[in-house]
């Protein structure tokens, strides 16, 4: 075997969880082989440089061996060398911004506890 479909290879080396995810990434121009966009059926060979965008991170790999079967994570370094720069990997570890804004007590809608107290107060007047 001297070449393999890129979608199958990316699935086998565990870049994507499913083969259909890998195919969608290829068809969405998120995968490149040696700097050119690759469709799912494009053949990858030993020595090729593969880059795949997953989320905000651009992963880069050098093909060392080919495999048609999905492998355990411990075997992946034998088949692909991870060349992803540390700056790209840092994007994965960046804190996720939260959209919840802390409000001062007493402003805005009442909390559940405050609502219960208001309900109890209303019950006294009725």
Image (spheres, grey):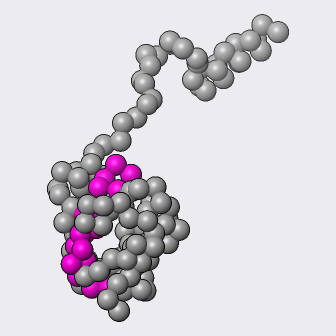
Q: Residue at x 39, y 52 (%)?
A: 55
Q: Position of residue 104 (x, y in %)?
A: 43, 16
Q: Residue at x 35, y 92 (%)?
A: 1
Q: Nearer the viewer, residue 50 or 103?
A: 50
Q: Nearer the viewer, residue 14 or 67?
A: 67
Q: What type of secondary structure mainly makes up the magenta span?
A: strand
Asked if residue 106 lies left or right of residue 50, the reply is: right
Q: Residue at x 37, y 77 (%)?
A: 43
Q: Quadrant of the C terminus?
A: top right
* Magenta stretch, residue numbers: 47-66
Magenta stretch encompasses residue 65: yes
- Whether residue 120 is visible, yes or no, is yes
Q: Residue furthest top?
A: 125
Q: Quadrant of residue 39?
A: bottom left
Tell me: residue 121, above or below residue 60: above
Q: Nearer the viewer, residue 115 or 56?
A: 56
Asked if residue 91 lies left or right of residue 27, the reply is: left
Q: Position of residue 81 (x, y in %)?
A: 21, 74
Q: Quadrant of residue 114?
A: top right
Magenta stretch encompasses residue 61: yes
Q: Position of residue 97 (x, y in %)?
A: 36, 36
Q: Quadrant of residue 98?
A: top left
């Amino acid at each position: 075997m001297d070449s393999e479909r890129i979608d199958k290879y990316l699935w086998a080396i565990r870049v994507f969880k499913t083969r259909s995810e890998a195919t969608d990434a290829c068809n969405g121009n998120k995968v490149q082989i040696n700097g050119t966009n690759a469709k799912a059926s494009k053949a990858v060979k030993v020595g090729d440089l593969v880059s795949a965008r997953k989320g905000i991170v651009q992963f880069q790999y050098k093909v060392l061996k080919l495999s048609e079967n999905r492998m355990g994570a411990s075997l992946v370094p034998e088949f692909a060398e991870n060349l992803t720069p540390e700056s790209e990997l840092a994007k994965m570890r960046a804190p996720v911004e939260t959209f919840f804004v802390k409000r001062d007590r007493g402003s805005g809608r009442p909390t559940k506890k405050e609502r219960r107290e208001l309900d109890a107060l209303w019950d006294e007047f009725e």
